[in-house]
Image (spheres, rainbow, N blue to C red):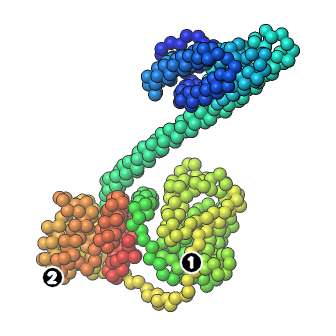
Amino acid sequence: MTAEAADGGSLGEGLRIDPVRAECIRTLFQQIPNSFAAAGVVTIYMCATQAPFHPWTEIAAWLAVQLSTQLFRFWLVTRYRRIPADDDGARLERAARLNTLYMLIAGCVWGSTAFLFMDLAQPITVALTLCGLYGISGGSVPGNAYNPAGLYAFVGAIFGLVMVRFLLVGQYAYDVLGAASIGYSAILFGFCRVQNRELKDGFAIRFENRRLLIEVERERAEAEAARARAEHANLAKSQLLAAASHDLRQPLHALSLFSGSLQGLALDDEAKDVAARIQANVAAMEKLFNGLLDISRLEAGVVQSHREPVSCQDLFDRLAAYFDPVAEQQGLDLRFRDAGLWVDADPALTEQICVNLVTNALRYTRTGGVLVAARRRGPKNSGRISLEVADTGIGIARRDQGRIFDEFVQIGNPERDRGKGLGLGLAIAQRMAAILESRIEIASVEGRGSRFSFSLPAAAPAETARTVATRDLMQGLRLLLIDDDAMVREGAGLLLGQWGVEVAATADLATAEALIAGQARRFDICLADYRLPGAANGLDVIAALANRPKAPKAFCLVTGDMAADLLAAADAAQVPIIHKPLHPARLRALLNHLAAGRTRRAVA
């Protein structure tokens, strides 16, 4: 509120006053009906107590003036009610000023009783009059605390006239009584100021709470909008990955097949070196795609846990077979400690988590070694086993430990050296641990090493099947390949022919059906690309061929797409799925698994 408005200056029509001031004025007028009743009660008291001592004409005249002031007040209330509820400008402030004017007039009318009804010859009339004036002034404090100017005018007029009346008497006792009345009015002013301050604070808190609620609602709406944008961006990302994956994987798939077939040719040393470099770069790109694929599959929720008792010793034996040569090449000591423990877990997921953790430990350890251990943690009856991978590597600073499980985050690899990985291993491992209802924890000291661990329920030892050496089933294998890319068909035919596989390649369902019908002997395996000419996709083709006579014994979907809905559809149809580009070693392992009848766990 401007200084002009505060000191009673004129207000322009467009000026807005402080919201707290506006609320005080509104509440003031809401209290006026109660003031009517209070004024009526004290008026009746004044007339009744003075009737025995004064002519009825004097009392009636005063009563008429009193009623006229109440009519003026009634007009004020009626005028106020015409102001719109949302108006907090000049009209509201004018209503408050008119009310202050009324209070000044009413104070003069009440104060006039000091001259009309105080008969010094009859001291009782002084006492009765003062009782009425003290009562009406004290009762006016709560109603006028919303507008202290009205109280100052009302009480000041009453006791100002009382003081004048007593001073005119010229007696010490009445001078003291007048001074006491002035002191009483000062006390009322103090009460009014305190109440006004508390009321303003309460209104300010109410407005602040309202503002905060509006702000919270606005922020909630913004958060909802941001969430919707994030979901839309995530969907767009998935769609982009799905589309770009297919377009990029298709030539990589053909390149991998051709480069793999080079290794089976008679080449000189220089050509073999070039072929090896090509294969290494294709493998690096394949690693990136497979990492993105794993993230996509885990986010899609198509990776399910199939729990069974898992021997930590068998698990560590497989890890040793993978990593002993790597550790030896780096000059590191790789040790395993299992204590004969068993865990209740998914074998494939548990092994993949450990592979990612050991890979990470070996990558960032320059001297010393890595310990992979299974330990009982907590009370003996807690029933949980902790699988731990501890290293003597570079360690991780505390500030970085919270983000190492995010995608593409690598500590100590600012140059993005591909030899140090892609920053996906820990992110994938953490998601797999969540599927096993666990969580990877980290304890690390920068410069001294790290320990990654996750816990699984303990399990009772189970009988293990005898390990049977897997023979190469490539020789004489009959394979039907359905792919619309001629380069892929040619590269696959060249590579598979070197392995002794009999390949029939086609680009569509109709030709595939004709090939199946024209063969006296069934195909062992059918590899179908997902994206094919026409309306049918690879899943549709597999479903159609599976119901035909002489259908292939095993099917597998080959695709470069990473879309979550495709992964879910393949899982629902129980069709193994493998993604492009296919490294020759992975393709050979896939065909061996399919030929042996292990179509689900080993491939999917």
Q: Residue at x 40, y 61 (%)?
A: 300
Whole-angstrom CA distance, mark 1 to mark 2, is 52 Å
Residue at mark 2:
520
In depth, the one of 397 and 565 nearer the eye is 565
Say which quarter of the image contains residue 375: bottom right
Say what amino acid the circle numbered 1 marks: Pro
Does 595 appear above or below 365? below
Q: Going from the N terminus, do you reach mark 1 or mark 2 first?
A: 1
Residue 206 visible to the viewer: yes
Residue 493, position as x, y percentages in the image: 26, 68
The crowd level at tag 1 (other Cα within 10 Å; few <14, some 14-19, many 20+) is some
Q: Residue at x 65, y 57 (%)?
A: 396
Marks 1, 2: nearer the viewer: 1
Residue 3, position as x, y percentages in the image: 62, 14
Residue 223: which disc?
none
In depth, the one of 407 and 127 nearer the eye is 127
The crowd level at tag 2 (other Cα within 10 Å; few <14, some 14-19, many 20+) is few
Q: Residue at x 61, y 77 (%)?
A: 385
Q: Residue at x 56, y 48 (%)?
A: 415
Query: Is 227 situated left or right of 254 in this image?
Result: right
Q: How many marks?
A: 2
Does 316 appear above or below 412? below
**Quadrant for the C terminus in the image:** bottom left
Residue 93, position as x, y percentages in the image: 54, 19
Query: Is 260 situated left or right of 309 in this image?
Result: left
**Helix, strand or loop for disc 1:** strand
Residue at mark 1:
457
**Quadrant for the N terminus in the image:** top right
Does 72 appear above or below 578? above
Say what amino acid the circle numbered 2 marks: Ala
**Helix, strand or loop for disc 2:** loop
